[in-house]
Amino acid sequence: MHFQEITQYERKLYNDGIKYIAGIDEVGRGPLAGPFVVSAVILNLDKIFSKELELMINDDKLRKNPPEKLLYTKINDSKLVSPKNRGILAEFIRKEAISYSIELLPPEKIDEIGVSEATQICFFNAIKNLKTLPEIILTDTFEVKKLIKDCQINITKGDTKSISIAAASIVAKVYRDSIMIEMHKTYPMYGFDRHKGYGTKYHIDALCKYGPCEIHRKSFNPVKKMVNKSL
C-alpha cells in the first residue's frame, strides 16, 4: 500500500510518457549550526514500474531474504526512516539513480543572504547540475522561482507522496548528517553528532557554556543574541 501511495505522482506521469522526473528536497533550514543541503534525484522509473519489481513485491517467499531491488519499496520521507536504513537507502539511491546532485550553502552564506534566498539558490543549482535534464520537477511544497511553473509540481507533504522527493530527502539528510558528525570531531563540546546542529536543550546548554563556534549561524537566535551580547 505504501509503495502505491508514494509512487502515485510518478506513475501518472510515467503513464503519460514522462520518464525523467526530478524529485528535490532540502534539509537544514532550521538548525543553529551547519550547512543547508539540497538534493535532486532522477530515479529509474523503468525499473520502479517494471513487471519484475511488481512480481517481487507480491512474492511472500522473498520477505525473509529480499533482493536489493525491493529497497525501492522502503524509500520514504527521511524523517520516517531509521538512521541505519537511511544510510543503506542513500547508497542504493545514488547507485540506482539516473542522475542525482547535492548542493549546500555554508552557515556564513546563510547569514549573508538568509534562508529563503539560500533555498532558492540551492534548489535551482541542484536541478541545473543534474547530468540528465528532467522533463518535470517535483518539490515538497516549495516553488523554485527561477524555473517555469509549468515544469514543476509543488506537492504538500511531498516527501510522503512522491518516491522521487523522498529519495532526495534521504540523500540530502545522510549527506548533511555525515558533515555534522565530522564537525563533531572538531567541535566535540557541542554534541553535533547527537543533534546535527538543531536547537536541542543539550545544544543550547553547550552554547551558553562555550559560546558559538565557526559553524554556528550568527543570524539565528539564540546565537545572534550571544554574538551581539559579546560585542
Image (tube, rainbow, N blue to C red):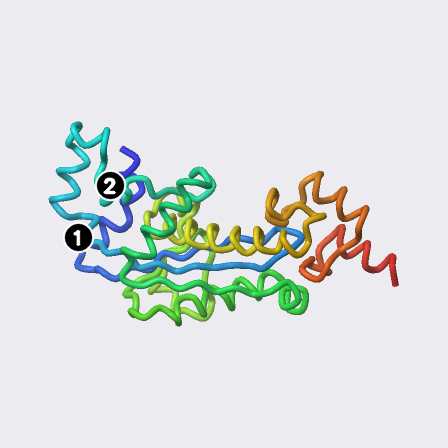
Quarter occupied by residue 61: top left
Category of crowding for the residue at label 1, using alpha-carbon neighbours closer than 10 angstroms: few (below 14), some (14–19), many (at least 20): few
Q: Earlier in the sequence, mark 2 or mark 1?
A: 1
Three-letter amino acid code of the residue under disc 2 = Leu
Residue drawn at x 67%, y 60% is 215
Give the position of the C terminus as an image quadrant.
Answer: bottom right
Residue drawn at x 37%, y 45% is 88
Q: Report the front residue among 37 and 158.
A: 37
125 in relation to 74, above or below:
below
Please, what secondary structure does the residue beneath circle 2 have? helix
Residue drawn at x 51%, y 53% is 178
Give the position of the N terminus as an image quadrant.
Answer: top left
The image position of residue 111, as x and y in percent, is 67, 64
Q: Nearer the viewer, mark 2 or mark 1?
A: 2
Three-letter amino acid code of the residue under disc 1 = Asn
73 in relation to 229, above or below:
above
Side of 219 relative to 61 (left or right): right
User: Which residue is denoted by mark 1 in the rendering?
Assistant: 15
Q: Report the front residue among 126 and 177.
A: 177
User: Which residue is denoted by mark 2 in the rendering?
Assistant: 70
Category of crowding for the residue at label 2, using alpha-carbon neighbours closer than 10 angstroms: few (below 14), some (14–19), many (at least 20): some
Please, what secondary structure does the residue beneath circle 1 have? helix
The image position of residue 110, as x and y in percent, is 63, 64
Q: Which mark is residue 179?
A: none
